[in-house]
Amino acid sequence: MARINLELNELQAFLAVAEKSSFKAAAEALYLSQPALSRRIEKLEQSLQVRLLERTTRSVRLTEEGAHFLLHAQNVVDELEQAMRGLGERAERRSGLVSIASIPSVAQHLLPAALAELAASYPALCLRVFDEGAQEVLEQVLAGHADFGINFIGAEDPNIDFEPLLTERYVAVMQQGHPLGGRTTLEWRDLVGERLIGVSQRSGNRLLLDHHLASLPERPRVHYEAGHLHGAYGMAMAGLGVMIVPELSLTPAYMHKLVGITLEDPQISRTIGLITRSGYKPNPAVVKLIELVRGQFKKYCQSKRLSA
């Protein structure tokens, strides 16, 4: 078998001249000088031992052999580019880093299943989860430290795209056996005189609840406070008082000791959504994870008959 001694840049030079019918235009398209382009064409013709182009001072046209070779050269370049794209996609599937910022209730309850399914498709992919408060999640996305976030704030930020995923209610959570624990619903006035367990006043949930409590003619007081929800849940399981939390945060891990009761008159809720920086272009692994996260939220909404 004769040894093929062709270079990719020679084929690209020939294809550019054939497309432009001009050495000058082809050289500009390839960011080459015309002498450099001519040398590549001459080397290709020497390797093939045929003349591919007829050149005059005013025009360039393909010879019969050049026209025959053009189709094959284009196929070779197309196949090579396709193979290179395929290798790039395979490499991306094998490695890389995806970072997600999420409020803790979602990071604990819905995100793990999506991450597990992504890891099965991208086994060498590194995953990083920032499970932070709402403001910190927003900052991680805005700073570009997270590919996307799951949050209940950010919709008003002009630099953020917000896609609603779930509108969830707030519930009263208390120890099983509490005098109010057998009720199916509660009104806010039922909690007057109860000792509330709250989280830090810096948290988005606390700000929302304080705003609502301020509008009530009679309101329960926060007697106990924790920095994060898991600390507050520990207090509730010890029977110290009642928590007002988003329903999603009441995971099965707590339900052996606690009960959640819907709050009405009025009912308050929050909308959780997927947040990305405006104009952000996700890579295939991030696109896949976003699809999986949407699927988990859809399943949860269907199981609870909630609005997405």
Image (cartoon, helix red, strand yellow):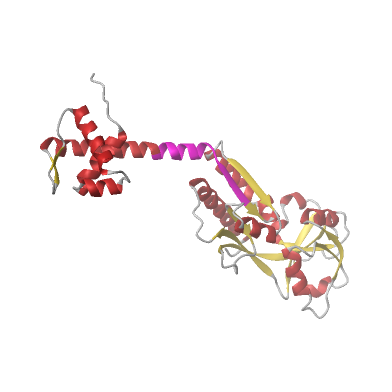
Camera-side residue: 189 or 117?
A: 117
Q: Residue at x 81, y 75 (%)?
A: 189
Q: Where residue 139 sits in the image (x, y, percent)?
A: 65, 59
Q: Quadrant of residue 210?
A: bottom right
Camera-side residue: 172 or 209?
A: 209
Q: Where residue 84 sits in the image (x, y, percent)?
A: 39, 37
* 190 sits left or right of 54 in the view: right
Q: Is residue 74 above or below residue 198?
A: above
Q: Where residue 57 sits in the image (x, y, percent)?
A: 13, 46
| Magenta residues, start to end | 85-100
Task: Please check the rendered image and state whether residue 95 is part of the magenta-colored stretch, yes or no.
Answer: yes
* 197 sits left or right of 115 in the view: right
Task: Please check the rendered image and state whether residue 266 is part of the magenta-colored stretch, yes or no.
Answer: no
Please state, as top left, top right, bottom left or bottom right, where the C terminus lies in the image.
Answer: bottom right
Q: Where residue 249 sits in the image (x, y, percent)?
A: 71, 57
Q: Residue at x 14, y 48 (%)?
A: 59
**Residue 300 visible from this viewpoint:** no
Q: Is residue 40 above or below residue 150?
A: above
Q: Quadrant of residue 276?
A: bottom right
Q: Is residue 47 above or below residue 36?
A: above
